[in-house]
């Protein structure tokens, strides 16, 4: 679960070697944060991805929703589902199930 820090380090290292992170590298880092239950960092990465003018995909959103689910952050998970729909991404079983589970865990 402590590997999220290494993932963030590798993501930031891409800039050092003059490579721009893409949606895949951001999604992998968000997924690492999800596994480490670092939901706030996952959401920060999602915002940074948008600021980099990259478009998150269903994998990105699902990882972020799952990160919120792990800590029972149902408001954030629900907000991400709304963002997903607004971005014309089709929610999948993973994103919807994670949002439902976040609601369940919040009580």
Image (cartoon, helix red, strand yellow):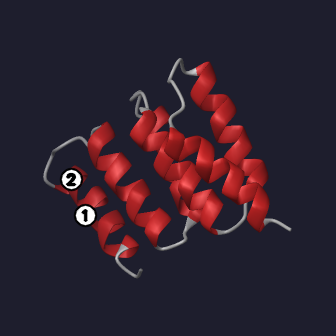
Q: Is residue 91 above or below residue 97?
A: above
Q: Nearer the viewer, residue 25 or 92?
A: 92
Classed neighbour count for the residue bearing mark 1: other residues with Cα under 10 Å, few (<14), some (14–19), many (≥20): some
How many numbered discs, if any? 2
Residue nearest the observer in this picture, 25 or 77: 77
Q: From the viewer's perspective, tell me whether residue 41 is left or right of residue 31.
A: right
Q: Is residue 61 something that shows in the picture?
A: yes
Mark 2 lies on a secondary structure that is helix
Circle 2 Cα neighbour tier, 10 Å, few/some/many (<14 / 14–19 / ≥20): some
**Proximity of marks 2 and 1: CB atoms separated by less than 8 Å:** yes
Relative to the observer, which residue lies in front, 37 or 45? 37
Left or right: 30 in relation to 75: left
Which image quarter holds the C terminus?
bottom right
Instruction: Determine the residue located farthest toward the right in the rendered image.
Output: 107
Q: Residue at x 55, y 21 (%)?
A: 87
Write the residue at 80% across / 65% down: 106
Q: Residue at x 35, y 64 (%)?
A: 8
Provide residue 83's location: percent of width, then percent of height: 63, 30
Q: Position of residue 102 (x, y in %)?
A: 70, 58
Asked which secondary structure carries label 1, the reply is helix
Residue 61 screen position, x and y as percent: 50, 41
Which mark, by number, is residue 14?
2
Report which quarter residue 60 is drawn in: top left
Q: Residue 33 location, x and y as percent?
A: 46, 65
Q: Which residue is mark 1?
A: 10
Quadrant occupied by the N terminus:
bottom left
User: For the point 23% across and 60% down, which residue is it?
Assistant: 13
The answer to whether residue 65 is above or below residue 79 is below
Q: Tell me: 52 left or right of 79.
A: left
Q: CA distance from mark 2 to mark 1?
A: 7 Å
Residue located farthest toward the bottom when viewing the structure as drawn: 2
Q: Tell me if residue 43 can be seen.
A: no
């Amino acid at each position: 679960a402590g590997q999220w820090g290494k993932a963030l380090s590798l993501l930031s290292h891409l800039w050092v070697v003059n490579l721009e992170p893409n949606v895949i590298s951001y999604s992998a880092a968000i997924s690492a944060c999800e596994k480490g239950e670092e939901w706030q960092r996952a959401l920060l990465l999602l915002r940074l991805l948008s600021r980099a003018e990259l478009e998150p995909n269903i994998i990105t959103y699902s990882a972020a929703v799952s990160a919120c689910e792990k800590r029972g952050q149902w408001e954030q998970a629900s907000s991400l589902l709304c963002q997903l729909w607004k971005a014309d991404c089709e929610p999948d079983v993973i994103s919807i199930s994670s949002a439902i589970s976040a609601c369940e865990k919040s009580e």
